[in-house]
Structures are given as C-alpha cells and as structure tokens.
Amino acid sequence: MTCTPPTSVLNSYSPPLTLAPQTVTVSTTALYGPCVSLSQPAITSGTRSASATTTTSCADLLGPGTFTYTITWNTGQTSTLSTNYTRVAAGGVYTVTATGVVTAGVFAGDTVLVNYTGISTDITLCTLGLGTVSSLYLPLGTLELTSV
C-alpha cells in the first residue's frame, strides 16, 4: 500500500502553542490518498481525526516520540499503526519521519514508513520565544505499508 501527496495532516492548537508549557486542545485531521494497494485494490484513500487535551509547548514539536493511531479507509476498514517518529525543523522545513508496524485491522503485520514535510517558520519563531503556533499543516505526505 502506498499513499502519496496530497496525503496531509493538519494539527490545530487551542490556545496557540507558546514556548511555555500550557494546557492545549490539539485537533488533528489527516487525509491519506491517493492510495494504491495490490492486496486491497478497493482501498484508495483514508482519514484520521482526533482531539485531545494535553500540556505541551512548541518545543515539544521537535525530537523523537511514539504515536499509535487508527486510519479509517474509504471502504470502512481500519488499520491501527504503532510508530516511532522523529521531528526536525531545519532550513525553513519541518520534517516528520515515522517507522513502525500495523498492529490491528487490514494490513496487520505490515511495516510502516511515514514522511510529512511542511514549513517550519512558526515553530522556529516560537522556540525562540518570538511567536506562537496556532496550527501546523504538513501538505506533502507519504504513507507506505509493506508486507514482511
């Protein structure tokens, strides 16, 4: 299974992230597609949305972490992915790279490779104490699920 741009993710932060940790509601919408799968040809796109309240800051947008989430495919099937990721802001570009495994649902057992890229200006200014981050849009994404 391969999903290519315009695969994207949008995170919104309320209130906007600052350098100082605070309680924030994070809302996420991710769109996957177009997708091509030889084993599941009916799957051509997917979505993921969630909202959670946490204590965080813009500095937490950098570095490593873990993330488990579920994608709902256009067929109604789901896949739960468990990943380890790294996040880097360099040269005006914000890059998220994740690897892991599909732990449940369609494609269970497949390895996961995810890449997202966007602009890092707001993150850089915020980590310098010169601004806030109200949303983070990563419009260039890919998702690859590979059977082992």
Image (spheres, rainbow, N blue to C red):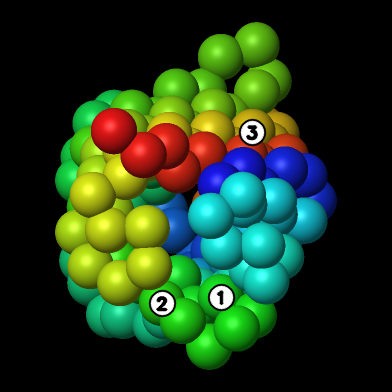
Q: CA distance from mark 3 to mark 1?
A: 22 Å
Inter-mark Cα distance, 1 to 2: 6 Å
Q: Name the amino acid, label 3.
A: Thr
Q: Quadrant of residue 113?
A: top left
Say which of 130 and 96 sits in front. 96
Q: Nearer the viewer, mark 2 or mark 3?
A: 2
Secondary element type, mark 3: strand
Residue at point 30% right, 72% down? 105
Outermost residue, front direction? 39
Toward the viewer: 95 or 103?
A: 103
Residue under label 1: 73
Residue 44, above or below 145: below
Q: Residues within 10 Å of mark 3 (few under 14, many from 20)?
A: many
Residue occupying the point 56% across, 75% down = 73
Question: Which residue was labeled with disc 3?
Answer: 117
Where does residue 123 sit, x and y in percent of width and height? 53, 38
Q: Residue type at mark 2?
A: Thr
The residue at 53%/88% (across/down) is 76
Look at the image and tell me whether residue 57 can be seen.
yes
Q: Earlier in the sequence, mark 3 or mark 1?
A: 1
Tell me if label 1 and label 2 are in contact, CB under 8 Å. Answer: yes
Callout 2: SS: strand
Mark 2 and mark 3: span between their CA atoms?
A: 24 Å
Residue at image mark 2 = 78
Question: Tag 1's secondary structure?
Answer: strand
Check the image and report above or below for 16 versus 39: below
